[in-house]
Image (cartoon, helix red, strand yellow):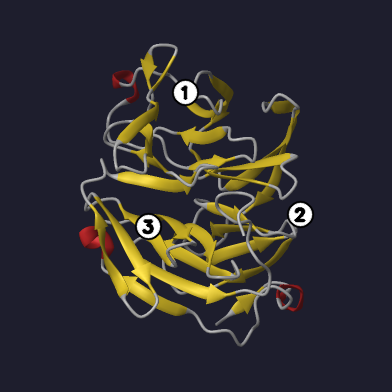
């Protein structure tokens, strides 16, 4: 596995001799992408989205990839709430949903101030139960056909009662993740090729004056910021030019996990010890073993 840029510093996170495992391919019928990987610890399996084919897939050791659910309203980002229920960002229905234990669907969010959301993309849950999600324009429809005039990042209260617009000046807000102590929220902008960081306020909103570019992930090779996760030591993992970038808590680029695919669409930690880094690309699912555990999902889980 090629490891680049300050490789000795990355050695403490991923061994340079560690191999990349290709777990599946052919998703999206060539149109892609595979997305939204999510480890389901008590089941010992990974769920991920096959967006173009409108289905949710499942990977398990020894069983490979199988169909888990369809249709999904072409869902993208997935996570779990504090009760372990599946949250999904649905493209076609332009909403965020929650799947209850009996399989029924609860609409978590589908509008802001009476106007339909654009196309929810990715979602994360804070330890207080609040739900944060990105809502970019990512559709062939012209902007004048959308209800909202901006790409937003939102916070929804745990009781689903109050939806707050946190920031509206991203072009394509995509992946988002909290630091281990939840004092910082990272949000990447795919179009601008960078990750921005915001300090959190006690009420769960962003301290806008703290807005800063955390890291620029552009380069000569294919790949843009997309899905993003953080490990228990605060290192940030995000798709970028050439593979999965690993950044320390200060934003320093420690190195790149170059998996050979054209673009990284999302990443997720899993396995019994949360040390397996799964990644999706346009058409594939892969994994690599890390030395540091990722933050569990649901947050606080073990």
Whether the residues at callouts 3 and 1 have beta carbons within 8 Å, the answer is no
Locate residue 18: give its quadrant.
bottom right
The 10 Å Cα crowd at callout 3, few under 14, some 14 to 19, many 20 or more, is many
| Residue contact between numbered discs 2 and 1, judged by CB atoms under 8 Å | no
Please state which of the two labelled residues, at mark 3 or mark 1, is closer to the viewer: 3
Badge 1 marks a residue whose secondary structure is loop
Up the image or down, 44 lies above or below 99; here it is: below
Q: Which residue is mark 3?
A: 48
Which residue corresponds to mark 1? 150
According to the picture, the residue beneath numbered tag 2 turns out to be 249
Say which label, 2 or 3, has the lower sequence index.
3
Which quadrant, please, contains the N terminus? bottom right
Q: What secondary structure is found at the residue carrying circle 2?
A: loop
Q: Residue furthest bottom?
A: 17
At horizontal 47% and vertical 64% (from top left) the residue drawn is 279
- Measured as percent of width and height from the top left, residue 99 is found at 36, 40
Task: Pick whichever, 301 or 275, lies toward us.
Answer: 301
Quadrant of the frame with the C terminus? bottom right
Along the polypeptide, which appears first: circle 3 or circle 1?
A: 3
Residue at figure coordinates x 21%, y 50% from the top left: 70
Q: CA distance from mark 3 to mark 1?
A: 28 Å
Residue at 53 percent across and 70 percent down: it is 271
Q: Could you say whether the residue bearing mark 3 is in a helix, strand or loop? A: strand
Q: Earlier in the sequence, mark 2 or mark 1?
A: 1
Q: Position of residue 137 (x, y in %)?
A: 39, 32
Measured as percent of width and height from the top left, residue 3 is found at: 62, 77
In this orientation, which residue lies closer to the viewer: 240 or 51?
A: 51
| Residue 54 percent location from the top left of the image | 23, 49
Marks 2/3: CA–CA distance: 27 Å
């Amino acid at each position: 596995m090629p490891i680049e840029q300050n490789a000795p510093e990355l050695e403490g996170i991923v061994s340079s001799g560690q191999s990349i495992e290709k777990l599946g391919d052919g998703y999206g019928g060539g149109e892609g992408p595979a997305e939204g990987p999510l480890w389901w610890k008590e089941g010992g399996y990974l769920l991920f989205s096959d967006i173009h084919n409108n289905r949710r897939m499942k990977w398990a050791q020894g069983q490979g990839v199988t169909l888990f659910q369809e249709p999904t309203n072409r869902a993208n980002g997935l996570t779990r709430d504090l009760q372990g229920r599946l949250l999904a960002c649905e493209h076609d229905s332009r909403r965020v949903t929650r799947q209850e234990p009996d399989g029924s669907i609860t609409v978590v969010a589908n509008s802001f101030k009476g106007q339909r959301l654009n196309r929810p993309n990715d979602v994360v849950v804070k330890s207080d139960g609040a739900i944060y999600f990105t809502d970019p324009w990512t559709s062939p429809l012209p902007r004048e056909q959308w209800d909202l005039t901006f790409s937003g990042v939102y916070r929804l209260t745990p009781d689903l009662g109050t939806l707050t617009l946190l920031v509206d000046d991203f072009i394509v807000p995509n992946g988002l993740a909290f630091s281990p102590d939840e004092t910082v929220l990272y949000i990447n902008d795919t179009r601008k090729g960078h990750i921005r960081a915001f300090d959190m306020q006690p009420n769960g909103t962003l301290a806008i004056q703290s807005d800063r570019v955390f890291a620029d992930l552009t380069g000569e090779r294919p790949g843009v910021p997309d899905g993003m996760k953080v490990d228990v030591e605060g290192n940030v993992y995000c798709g970028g030019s050439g593979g999965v970038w690993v950044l320390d808590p200060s934003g320093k680029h420690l190195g790149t996990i170059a998996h050979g695919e054209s673009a990284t669409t999302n990443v997720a930690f899993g396995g019994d010890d949360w040390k397996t880094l799964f990644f999706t690309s346009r058409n594939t699912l892969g994994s690599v073993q890390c030395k540091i555990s990722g933050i569990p999902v649901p947050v606080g889980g073990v």
